[in-house]
Image (cartoon, rainbow, N blue to C red):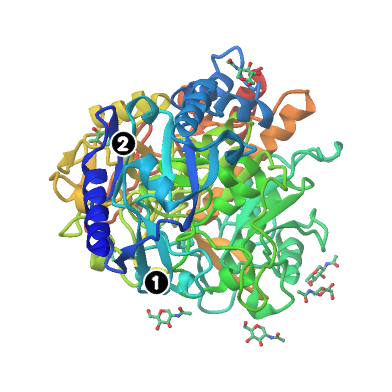
Amino acid sequence: MLGLNFVTLVLLLKAGLALAVPSNHAVHEKRATIHPRWTKAQRVHSRSILPMRIGLAQSNLEYAHLHLLDVSDPDSKNYGKHWTSEEIIQFFHPSNETIETVRNWLVDSGITIDRIVHTDNKAWFAFDATADEAERILHTEYYEYEDSVTGGILPACEEYYVPIHVQKHIDYVTPGIKLLAPPNAPNSKHDLMRRTERKITPHKFYRPKGPIQFPSSSDLSKCDSTITPACVAALYSIPPAASSRKPNPSNVLGIYESEAQYYYQPDLDLFFSNFTPYIKNGTHPTVISIDGGPGPTNNTSEAGGEVELDLQLAYPIVYPQGISIYQEDDAIYELDPNQTYTYGFNHLLDAIDGSYCTKSSYGETGDDPNLDPIYPDPAPGGYKGKTQCGVYKSTNVISFSYGGQEAHVPWAYQKRQCDEYLKLGLRGVSFIFASGDAGVGNYPEPYSFDGPTGCLGPQGTIFNPTWPNNCPWVTNVGATKVYPGKTVFEPESAVFDPAGHPYHVNFSSGGGFSNVYTVPDYQKSAVDTFFAKHNPPYKSYSAIVNNTDLVGTLGSYGGIYNRIGRGIPDVAAVGDNIATYVGGEFGLSGGTSASCPIFASVVNRINEERLAIGKTPVGFLNAVLYKNPWVLNDITNGTNPGCGTDGFSAVQGWDPVTGLGTPNYPKMLALFLSLP
Ligand SMILES: *[C@@H]1O[C@H](CO)[C@@H](O)[C@H](O)[C@H]1NC(C)=O
Ligand SMILES: *[C@@H]1O[C@H](CO)[C@@H](O)[C@H](O)[C@H]1NC(C)=O
Ligand SMILES: *[C@@H]1O[C@H](CO)[C@@H](O)[C@H](O)[C@H]1NC(C)=O
Ligand SMILES: *[C@@H]1O[C@H](CO)[C@@H](O)[C@H](O)[C@H]1NC(C)=O
Ligand SMILES: *[C@@H]1O[C@H](CO)[C@@H](O)[C@H](O)[C@H]1NC(C)=O
Ligand SMILES: *[C@@H]1O[C@H](CO)[C@@H](O)[C@H](O)[C@H]1NC(C)=O
Ligand SMILES: *[C@@H]1O[C@H](CO)[C@@H](O)[C@H](O)[C@H]1NC(C)=O
Ligand SMILES: *[C@@H]1O[C@H](CO)[C@@H](O)[C@H](O)[C@H]1NC(C)=O
């Protein structure tokens, strides 16, 4: 009798709980689907302890871009007055109202104040609660979910409720509806079920047939077949850096490297002695190791084509200024041949801004254990420390010849990261990214996850914009080429090399329109003019997608490109037939991987001149460039094929192939020196 009564009572209570969500509460998060890797198992025991985290809504995020423009718009009286990191934390941390409201809700729900921890960066509340308590506060039921891939078990619910007046103050609650692979699951980084990709902008290196005849260091007559430092300097009118002045110690150029890209000093020396005799043998970058990122290699066959291309383009422009390489992730992660575990850049951002490590937004707090490498790395030889947070001061400019496609990167992950580029822009950092090498599309399998065409939608016809280039707060660099028979004193054209001539894949300048970000104000009139004067010959759609199923959603719109998205790229630089030494051998290399460090080096040189007269670094560039397109060489010839089309056309004014054009150093310098 007793037993039966007890059972009945419990069942009634359960039913009562589920029904009795007070009317002043609302669903805060509800899971729509569950990945087949997860199985819902038994109810979490009522006395199990759950580590509760409540992400607080940050204030002022919606106005952040106005503040960035306030310090980077050429017409603003605050141009160049960048913020300190303390000012940024103060500005964005959750408002007192948010903190009070959420704390009062918890206290009223029976979580005494002494149990609640408020984290240092003010972004979340943490407390331990029994499952019973958590269920009562959130009007939900917690179940154990089993992960078939790792064997891990996570507590989660299907939906939860919070008071309506609290909703706008909290970002999300964990444990909640999210099912993330347990961070320490041994197999999590090799989980092939994840549809992830982090692909280096492919480095294309080939050795010309026949005896190698490379131009002497000052010969400009062969720039149509071999781009040397002299060709780059002539194209963009870059004079030798002032030798009378000591390089400013605060203006070292930053270059991001990952994926086992290690430089080999003898290659740099061979390059310097053949092409830039003014650079001393032994000149080398400082490797800033992030989470165990290794230093240079002494092994010829491990010389990294990307890092050496970057250095051999940047040194001739910035020397005697130095270069720092941000080498991200330990050798185990860098070498992961399948690259199934990660997207990248978060660990660099953690290392140069400690507040990013624990920042909550769009439902993500800190790094994503499904996508970012996890430390300490249990693998033999792995980095045994914790993820590095705020240990390095950022350089003024960082060049990134890496990226992927926006459709592959979860919406929340990329939004959170893009906000960080904005915040670091407020601090005066310029982020310069290669725009991609596959025109309006992506490389088909096996280079990508986009099927046989490398493009989106059920038929694989929709253009596939690149990431993180879609973020409005970075500067993207497309690629041009000096075609055979042309000289460096004639206009360049957008690059297109069909597969086999000479690289193994088609190469065209990454460009197009984001599906995740609307066109930013600073770019709007340039994009409007492009559509008005050079309407592309394809059916379009107008949509901004904020779910993570970018691919599925886009298929339903009709049309193959977005009419209202952020345009890519912003600028361009030469990116084909680049003379390089890799592994002791001379060859030619190409990609927007080459264009990016050229443009970044030009910006670094401009910073050097501004610093010399007591001004600040330029920081976020786009607002200035779009208002002053005359400082760039407009590129008006060529296209960026992809997705079975000719892509877009380079035309007069901005275009989604070469942006505003390639640098004219004297004009850019004069403009930036004229700004406050
Ligand atoms: C928020 O609270 C802190 C300390 O509790 C106080 O110093 C600050 O002035 C408050 N800010 C506002 C805008 O009320
Ligand atoms: C610099 O190094 C290169 C490659 O090892 C070598 O060929 C060259 O002679 C060196 N130059 C000087 C001045 O030592
Ligand atoms: C490479 O060689 C240099 C000079 O011999 C040495 O100092 C350095 O430790 C070596 N690095 C590695 C990774 O072996
Ligand atoms: C050099 O690197 C290659 C490729 O990683 C490796 O096979 C070889 O054993 C290495 N050589 C030495 C001497 O470490
Ligand atoms: C890489 O992926 C292939 C299948 O695509 C698999 O056979 C191999 O084991 C994977 N390697 C690692 C190290 O995960
Ligand atoms: C490469 O470009 C050619 C046009 O020259 C095009 O026909 C072909 O489909 C492209 N290949 C891929 C894989 O996009
Ligand atoms: C997400 O997209 C929908 C439909 O386009 C829109 O109504 C909603 O405001 C968007 N939400 C966010 C957070 O951007
Ligand atoms: C225009 O670009 C094409 C390649 O797309 C090139 O063959 C041609 O020479 C260029 N024309 C001019 C005038 O630069």
Kindly tell me whether residue 494 is visible in this rendering: no
Mark nearer the viewer, 2 or 1: 2
| Mark before the other along the chain sequence, 2 or 1 | 1
Q: Are marks 2 and 1 in contact (CB under 8 Å)?
A: no
Q: Secondary structure at mark 1?
A: loop
Q: Is mark 1 within 8 Å of ligand 6?
A: no
Q: Residue furthest top?
A: 77
As drawn, the label of residue 504 is 1
Taking 591 as reference, is 18 left or right?
left
Query: Residue 482: where, in percent of width, then height?
Result: 47, 52
Marker count (numbered): 2
Query: Residue 71: where, in percent of width, then height?
Result: 58, 21
Q: Classify residue 284 by image quadrant.
A: bottom right
Residue 286 vertical placement versus 358 (above, below): below
Say which amino acid is labelled 1: His
**Gap between marks 2 and 1 measured at Cα:** 31 Å
Q: Classify residue 382 by image quadrant.
A: bottom right
Q: Nearer the viewer, residue 86 or 590?
A: 86
Query: Residue 347: where, in percent of width, then height?
Result: 59, 53
Kindly tell me whether residue 433 is visible in this rendering: yes
Say which amino acid is labelled 2: Gly
Residue 448 vertical placement versus 170 (above, below): below
Query: Residue 507: where, in percent of width, then height?
Result: 39, 60
Q: Residue at x 75, y 29 (%)?
A: 611
Q: Name the residue beneath numbered marker 2.
A: 565
Packing grade of label 1 (10 A; few <14, some 14-19, many >=20) is: few
Q: Nearer the viewer, residue 132 or 239?
A: 132
Q: Secondary structure at mark 2?
A: strand
Q: Nearer the viewer, residue 348 or 13?
A: 13
Q: For the C terminus, which image quadrant?
A: top right
